[in-house]
Image (spheres, rainbow, N blue to C red):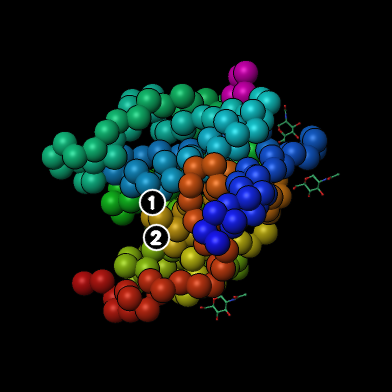
């Protein structure tokens, strides 16, 4: 009895263990090729590296030709993730382009072409005035195909005015302060992420990963987003309005 089952078991294995089919990225000249990350001192690491892990999957899994990344800041000094620049628990990131150099070249970076997608992280540093960062977002937004923010990164978008009259979300723990930066924004409290036209905002920190998968799914195809998630062994969050943290952080921060 026990042995007689074995042939059936082995016969079923090739089907059970088939690897996911590799989806093809559509050959579409309008698909974005040049991504930028806007950095300021005191950014939150996962806001940057979570989305970058997904985008790197786009590059590595599909060898998407001519995909470029720019690390953009107000000057060429390395940018530190240390919150409030107190202590040394953090790391510095090398900047590849400045706001001034990109704007002086009409929104392009030599060798990489026009900047098409900008990602703005949140973090303790977003509580600073960040006037140059906000001015850059306002100036570059009309030239972009898409802009994404993670966590309190949406406060920079709000301060630049590009979120006026738009739907957006932000970090739930920092909700009272974050939403005060954009009185004309239609803030959505219960949302893991919110797309509005070409502006995609996410809730706190790890929500940026789900935002990026949803964005990749929308632009490159859900099969592409799913394949990257399988490859990096991540369980995707598909429902943008399924937000358990909205109920957890339900009192204004002191
Ligand atoms: C600047 O870029 C815009 C697209 O963002 C383009 O339409 C325009 O022709 C460019 N201007 C110059 C002087 O290259
Ligand atoms: C190319 O991609 C863009 C953005 O995803 C999409 O809006 C457009 O319909 C696509 N065009 C073709 C011909 O597939
Ligand atoms: C998404 O999540 C919300 C909140 O849990 C739920 O009400 C809604 O039915 C879900 N939508 C889908 C399509 O599952």
* 22 to the left or right of 4: right
Say which quarter of the image contains residue 41.
Answer: top left
Name the disc covering residue 204, or none: 2
Looking at the image, can residue 76 be seen?
yes
**Residue at which label 1 appears:** 122
Q: Work out which quarter of the rendered image holds the N terminus and state it.
A: bottom right
Task: Tell me the distance, in whole angstroms, between the alpha carbons under discs 1 and 2.
Answer: 8 Å
Residue at the farthest left position: 87
N-terminal-most mark, 1 or 2 = 1
Name the disc covering residue 107, or none: none
Q: Work out which quarter of the rendered image holds the C terminus and state it.
A: bottom left
Q: Position of residue 85 (x, y in %)?
A: 20, 41
Question: Alpha-carbon neighbours of circle 1 within 10 Å: few (<14), some, or many (≥20)?
Answer: many
Badge 2 element: loop
227 versus 180 height, above or below: above
Answer whether residue 111 is magenta in the image.
Answer: yes
The reply to whether callout 1 and callout 2 are in contact (CB within 8 Å) is yes
* 82 to the left or right of 182: left
Q: Magenta residues?
A: 107-112
Asked if disc 2 is less than 8 Å from ligand 3, the answer is no
Q: Residue at x 45, y 58 (%)?
A: 207
Q: Position of residue 108 (x, y in %)?
A: 62, 28
198 versus 101 height, above or below: below
Asked if disc 1 is less than 8 Å from ligand 3, the answer is no
Looking at the image, can residue 100 be seen?
no
Question: Alpha-carbon neighbours of circle 2 within 10 Å: few (<14), some, or many (≥20)?
Answer: many
Say which quarter of the image contains residue 178.
Answer: bottom left
69 versus 195 height, above or below: above
Badge 1 element: loop
Rendered-image quarter of ligand 3: bottom right
Q: Residue at x 33, y 27 (%)?
A: 78
């Amino acid at each position: 009895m026990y042995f007689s089952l074995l042939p059936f078991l082995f016969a079923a294995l090739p089907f059970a263990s088939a690897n996911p089919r590799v989806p093809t990225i559509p050959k579409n000249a309008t698909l974005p090729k040049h991504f930028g990350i806007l950095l300021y001192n005191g950014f939150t690491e996962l806001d940057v590296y979570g989305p970058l892990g997904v985008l790197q999957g786009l590059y590595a899994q599909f060898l998407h030709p001519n995909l470029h990344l720019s690390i953009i800041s107000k000057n060429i000094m390395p940018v530190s993730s240390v919150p409030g620049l107190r202590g040394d628990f953090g790391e510095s990131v090398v900047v590849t382009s400045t706001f001034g150099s990109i704007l002086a070249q009409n929104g392009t970076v030599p060798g990489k072409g026009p900047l098409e997608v900008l990602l703005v992280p949140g973090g303790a540093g977003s509580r600073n005035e960040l006037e140059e960062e906000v001015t850059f977002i306002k100036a570059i937004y009309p030239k972009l195909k898409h802009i994404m923010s993670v966590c309190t990164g949406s406060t920079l978008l709000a301060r630049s005015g590009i979120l006026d009259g738009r739907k957006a979300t932000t970090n739930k723990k920092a909700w009272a302060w974050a939403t005060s930066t954009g009185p004309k924004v239609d803030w959505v409290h219960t949302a893991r992420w919110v797309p509005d036209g070409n502006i995609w905002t996410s809730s706190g920190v790890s929500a940026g990963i789900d935002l990026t998968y949803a964005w990749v799914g929308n632009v490159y195809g859900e099969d592409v987003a799913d394949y990257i998630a399988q490859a990096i062994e991540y369980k995707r969050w598909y429902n943008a309005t399924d937000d358990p943290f909205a109920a957890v952080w339900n009192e204004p921060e002191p």
